[in-house]
Amino acid sequence: MSVEKIGVIGGGLMGHGIAYLLAAAGHEVAVFDPAAEIRATLPGRLQAVADLFGDDPALPERIFVHEQLGAAFAAASFVFEAAPEKLALKQKIFADLEKLVAPDAILASNSSAIPTTQIGLHLKHRERVVGTHFWNPPHLVPLVEVIENEKTSDDVVRATMELLRDAGKTPVHVRRDVPGFVGNRLQHALKREAIALVAAGVCDAETIDIVVKEGPGARMAVLGPMEQSDLVGLDLTLNIADVLYADLDRTPGPHPFLRQKVSDGRLGMKTGEGFRHWTTETAAAVRERLSCFLLQQAKARKKPLT
Ligand SMILES: NC(=O)c1ccc[n+]([C@@H]2O[C@H](COP(=O)([O-])OP(=O)(O)OC[C@H]3O[C@@H](n4cnc5c(N)ncnc54)[C@H](O)[C@@H]3O)[C@@H](O)[C@H]2O)c1
């Protein structure tokens, strides 16, 4: 694996994890963030990741933080943008980067929803723009969707996948820049049905969570839906689809039940109530449970197979 010079744009929630995992893979990483508070807290947040993994405490010192998008980024072979989800802002960042980096440097956006076709629209070298959709927290969740747009070259997709694979991630190639890519489409298809079931009074929100965690979710980390269909047989899958699909929720747009919750200010853990009720303690317990679980999984993946 060659050591690359990598720029990360934005040192917030996603940017600090992306910077960490790339530095942990041995690359030279520079982070740019215009917010003084974010720059000031970055070393501590990186240290917390090192502590979480039990990594060399000196590792975060290899990540340099910058107030300007300057010389430290000019030599980068890859830049990962993790700035706020605003098209005009991302377009400006990419235009600034184009003036700075070599024509073959790869420019990747971590945007959740904005097509990279739009982000790179005014650039001269559009073939080097690619989507890299990391999942939060990026240093713990293995998947990265590598999204090709109309202009992305095959070489850029290949090099990006290789860099991420070498850094211990699980990159997948998404061949079209469709809204939600693959992961969020699947996740929201499930949420759509879950919300409709609760709204119809079929079960309560807690029951949905138990059903998913103790049922299909218990095996999903090792058995994807396509494998599962092949396992039970496509004939059975078709028989169930024949009976079920006509009954699944087809509300056009977000369900009124969700809209009502939001207009009532019931936004979830941050307001104490969403689909379920939360106290500071129960919300903290969920975050702790998630973090411990993801960490355990990440450590298990790092162990060599015997
Ligand atoms: N949070 C998630 O779960 C998640 C998951 C996948 C993808 N994303 C995407 O990742 C991107 C970043 O999200 P986040 O959650 O890390 O946001 P965040 O608000 O935590 O971080 C964004 C950072 O960008 C900085 N910033 C502001 N203006 C900037 C500029 N002009 N140049 C460089 N940096 C600038 C901010 O100071 C901040 O530190 C967004 O596009 C988001 O949609 C987020």
Image (cartoon, helix red, strand yellow):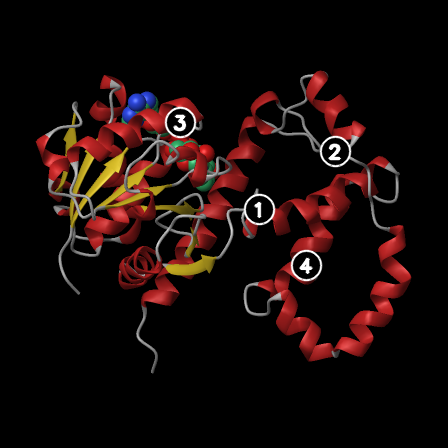
Q: Secondary structure at mark 4?
A: helix
Q: How far apart are the two marked residues, 2 and 4, measured between alpha carbons?
A: 29 Å
Q: Is residue 10 visible?
A: no
Residue at point 37%, 50% (across, down): 152
The amino acid beneath tag 4 is: Glu
Type of amino acid at the residue the image marks with label 3: Pro
Which of pointers 2 and 4 lies earlier in the amino acid sequence?
Answer: 4
Ligand 1 in which quarter:
top left
User: Which one is in front in this view, the residue at disc 2 or the one at disc 1?
Assistant: 2
Ligand 1 closer than 8 Å to label 3 CB: yes
Say what amino acid the circle numbered 1 marks: Asn
Gap between marks 4 and 3 measured at Cα: 35 Å
Residue at 85% x, 67% y: name it: 240
Are the residues tagged 2 and 4 within 8 Å (C-beta)? Answer: no
Q: Secondary structure at mark 1?
A: helix
Q: Residues within 10 Å of mark 1 (few under 14, many from 20)?
A: some
Task: In the rendered view, tell whether residue 109 sits above or below residue 298.
Answer: above
The residue to which callout 4 is attached is 214
Residue picked out by circle 1: 184
Q: Amino acid at mark 2?
A: Gly
For residue 291, say whether it is visible: yes
Mark 4: few/some/many CA within 10 Å (<14, 14-19, 20+): few
Q: Give the quadrant of residue 266.
A: top right
Spot the residue most to the front: 124
* Circle 2 residue: 253
Cα distance between the residues tagged 4 and 1? 21 Å
* Residue named by callout 3: 84
Q: Where does residue 174 sit, x and y in percent of width and height?
A: 48, 56
Q: CA distance from mark 2 to mark 1?
A: 16 Å
Q: Ligand 1 near label 1 (Cβ, under 8 Å)?
A: no
In primary-sequence order, the first of circles 3 and 1 is 3
Q: Secondary structure at mark 2?
A: loop
